[in-house]
Image (tube, rainbow, N blue to C red):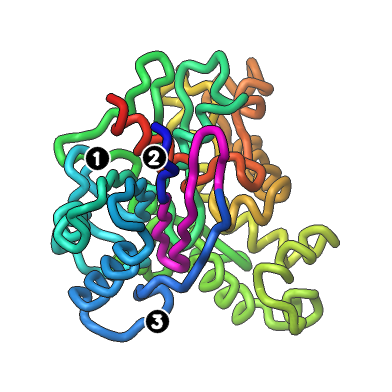
Amino acid sequence: MSQPIVVLDVGGTHFRWATWSRDGGLGQIRQVPTPSVANGTAGPVEELRARLVAMMAEAVPHGGVAGVSFGAALDHRSGTVYASAPLWGACTRPFDLMGALSAARPDVRWHVVNDVTAALRHLAAGPVGRDRRKLLLVTVSTGVACRVLDLRSGLIPVDGCGLQGEIGHLPAATSVAGGPVELCCDCGGSNHVASFSSGPGLRRLAGVLRDRDPRGWDAGPLAGPAPFGQALVSALDAGDPVAGELTRAATSPMADVTRTALCLDPELDMVAFTGGVATALGGHYRAALLGHLGDQGLYLTSGLAPAWVAERLLVCARGEADCLVGAGMAAEQAWVS
């Protein structure tokens, strides 16, 4: 298609949009806070949804084509959104996002995919997807989720609800400062993967570690004035033991998911991690995962072929699995098919 596609990425923290074309790539990216529970926006869920739809509708010119990357558990077949803890907390009332967007802007051709699906499509189109059978992408950001793409068929299989990979709300456990931790999840449950491993979960886990080991916390760089995310990266670079313990605790549930995935499906040729948390921590995140998988790896395989797991683990560089690009690719494919 000749006209650029307007691509939108809706997350619990930020709403981003730009134009995209296969030849010209991404245009200037604009970003505003998302009206969401994660951002502390007040109002009932219906109001938050209406405000979000209005923002999305305003971003697309008349008669345009829009590719949407949406950070929520949604029906891959219809675009109906079931839930998003970062956006709407514990609410699980289905939301016909496609219907709402079409009603707001009937002149626009809308195409909606899950944000991890969009990022995975972009990642798979690059060098990482070359000569692979299956590719698993995990996003660790305001929320946690994953998708598996079978590169031989081009399909992302879904269940009877049109879902796949909602790992953020699987039961999980971790420990810090010598004891187990119990934490709430933004969905209203407790002790989920996202309770400990998401961006908000990591901050809550840091609060537990600070309370249990105040002397160690106050003596290290995490107690300084720098923003938490920046301070954590700097502390890990400096080898701070408290930062290392925090990262190990936050990555333990992710290592459990990775171990199980590789055990159940040895055709997974790559397990990649993206999202604000994983990308920011980079090599530290991968090292923590490998540490867990070295301590408790795959039965027999980790002993007989120890490199088999390590060579399948990737933390994406910035821009390597871009939701905006993937949303454009998905919309383009729908337009021409």
Looking at the rendered structure, the secondary structure element under dot 1 is: loop
Q: Are marks 3 and 2 in contact (CB under 8 Å)?
A: no
Q: Residue at x 28, y 28 (%)?
A: 157
Q: Please tell me the numbered disc located at residue 76.
A: 1
Callout 3, which amino acid?
Answer: Gly
Callout 2, which amino acid?
Answer: Thr
The percent coordinates of residue 238 (x first, y second) are 85, 62
Q: Are marks 1 and 2 in contact (CB under 8 Å)?
A: yes
Looking at the rendered structure, the secondary structure element under dot 2 is: helix
Q: Residue at x 60, y 81 (%)?
A: 211
Mark pair 1, 3: CA separation: 28 Å
Mark pair 3, 2: CA separation: 27 Å
Asked whether, in this view, residue 281 is left or right of residue 208, the answer is right
Q: Earlier in the sequence, mark 3 or mark 2?
A: 3
Callout 1, which amino acid?
Answer: His
Asked if one can make out residue 245 in the rendered structure from this viewpoint, the answer is yes
Q: Verify whether residue 13 appears in magenta.
A: yes
Asked if one can make out residue 171 in the rendered structure from this viewpoint, the answer is no
The percent coordinates of residue 135 (x first, y second) are 48, 27
**Quarter in which the C terminus is drawn:** top left
Q: Earlier in the sequence, mark 1 or mark 2?
A: 1
Q: Which residue is mark 2?
A: 117
Q: Verify whether residue 232 appears in magenta.
A: no
Q: Please tell me the numbered disc located at residue 156.
A: none
Looking at the rendered structure, the secondary structure element under dot 3 is: loop
Please name the predominant secondary structure of the magenta segment in the image. strand
Specify the segment rendered in magenta: 7-26
- Name which quarter of the figure residue 223 lies in: bottom right
Q: How many marks?
A: 3
Q: Please tell me the numbered disc located at residue 40.
A: 3
**Quarter in which the N terminus is drawn:** top left
Asked whether 256 or 321 is in front, the reply is 321
